[in-house]
Image: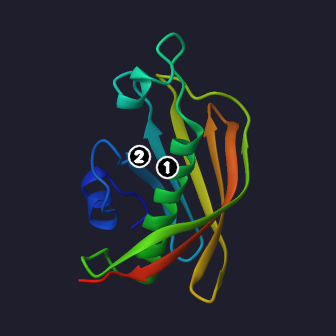
Amino acid sequence: MDKMDIHQIFQYLPHRYPFLLIDRVLECKLGESLVAIKNVTYNEPFFQGHFPHRPIMPGVLILEAMAQATGVLAFKSSQVQPDKGALYYLVGVDNARFKQPVEPGDQLVIEVKIMRILRGVWIYEATSKVDGKIVASAQLMCMKRELDT
């Protein structure tokens, strides 16, 4: 399955409003890459304080949206769904760069690519674009962890 709507995304991410930052998956190549979108609207709760006079999406939330895309790719590539026994955690961010602000009305196109899996740590190259221009990029590391029940 290449594309995923919000209902299918719910099956692969434990996040919910207001912290679910992926609206749709446009393309998924298992074990390779994923392209997702986040429609940024003025109604986002973080815009009330960041910043009232010039609303921009916080960079850490752009990183989180990219991390959520890696979670979908990892779960789908592993052919498992999140359960109450395990989650994928963001364990590292390297070389994060922010090129331009993301504002209400923008559509964030998130591209993640698996670079390698090393001792259970999934290492990804991630970029976010608006109108074809890179607004943020980073190398992300995620790891599956069993939860204490």
Disc number placed over residue 21 in the picture, else none: 2
Tell me the quarter of the image containing the N terminus.
Answer: bottom left
Residue 141 in the image: above or below residue 34 = below
N-term mark: 1 or 2:
2
- State the CA–CA distance, disc 1 to disc 2: 5 Å
Helix, strand or loop status at disc 1: helix
Disc number placed over residue 136 in the picture, else none: none
Q: Residues within 10 Å of mark 1 (few under 14, many from 20)?
A: many
Residue 92 in the image: above or below residue 38 = below
At horizontal 43% and vertical 81% (from top left) the residue drawn is 145
Residue 6 rendering spot, x and y as whole percentages: 29, 51
Q: Quadrant of residue 124?
A: bottom right
Residue 10 rendering spot, x and y as whole percentages: 27, 59
Q: In the shown orientation, is residue 14 left or right of residue 104? A: left
Q: Residue furthest bottom?
A: 119
Q: Which residue is mark 1?
A: 65
